[in-house]
Image (spheres, rainbow, N blue to C red):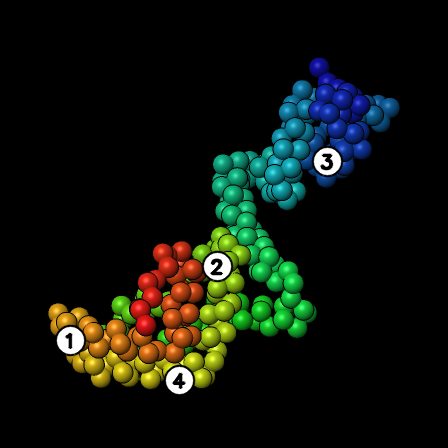
Amino acid sequence: MDHSIGAVARLAGVAVKTVRYYSDLGLLTSRRTTAGHRRYDETAVARLELIRTLRALGLHLETVRAVLERERTLADVLAAHADALAVQIRTLQAQYAVVSVATHSTPEELTDMTAHFEEARRTLIADFLTDTLGDDPALAAARQNLTPVLPVDAEPRQVEAWLELAALASSEDFRASVRRLTAGYRALAGDDPLRADPELRGQLIDLRRTADPRWHRYVELVAVVNGWAPPSRVAG
């Protein structure tokens, strides 16, 4: 049994113009009667429903065509589409976080904030740590603990912390204070900073206690960005 274009549209729950549109694109096959009317076979309704489902999932018409023509399997197409959607979701989450933080910003502040955000994501923190800690293997663990890693699904507070970190890392005055702190650490710790020495431990605590307050803030912000427990403050 074959169906008229109206019957196919009714069975699939779509408008006649939709059936005509997909037919003109070659996604639905039909034959013409002697009077020039389109007639569709039994597979047309199922084919049309599959087209509607794939389009509702956001697949492009060329991808739909590839599935219908068996050039690509449905499983492969959906797996690739799921990966693409995951990227879009992560991008939207990052955008949402930035927008949430910037709600009350002026246009100038928003521009500056976005620039810091993108710059920090690429090189700013790495450059800051290299500048202030150097490449001393003895400080490799410290460098790792001082590296913020903004998650792809960052919450607004994490983005806000990241932006504040970017501002700190951009400050030459702050960098200079961290270089002085690092030099003091090296002078005290020598070649074996992990040695069991109560006197050394007390000296290092005193060094941290007298550090630039922005240093303590930096450490707190890294914990926020990385989702760690807040660091304990050294008593003054």
Front residue of this view, candidates 121 and 87? 121
| Mark-to-mark CA distance, 4 and 1 | 27 Å
x%, y% of residue 209?
A: 31, 75
Task: Name the residue tied to disc 1.
Answer: 199
Q: Amino acid at mark 1?
A: Glu
- Residue topped by disc 4: 176
Do we see residue 32 in this rendering?
A: no
Q: Which mark is residue 158?
A: 2
Q: Residue furthest left?
A: 196
Left or right relative to 178: residue 107: right
Residue 195: image x %, image y %?
Answer: 14, 71
Q: Secondary structure at mark 3?
A: helix
Residue at 52%, 52% in the rendered image: 90
Mark closest to the chain's N terminus, 3 or 2: 3
The percent position of residue 144, horizontal first and vertical second, equals 32, 66
CB within 8 Å, label 2 to label 4: no
- Near mark 4 (Cα within 10 A), the count class, few <14, some 14-19 or many ≥20, is few
Note whether 118 is above or below 28 in the view shown: below
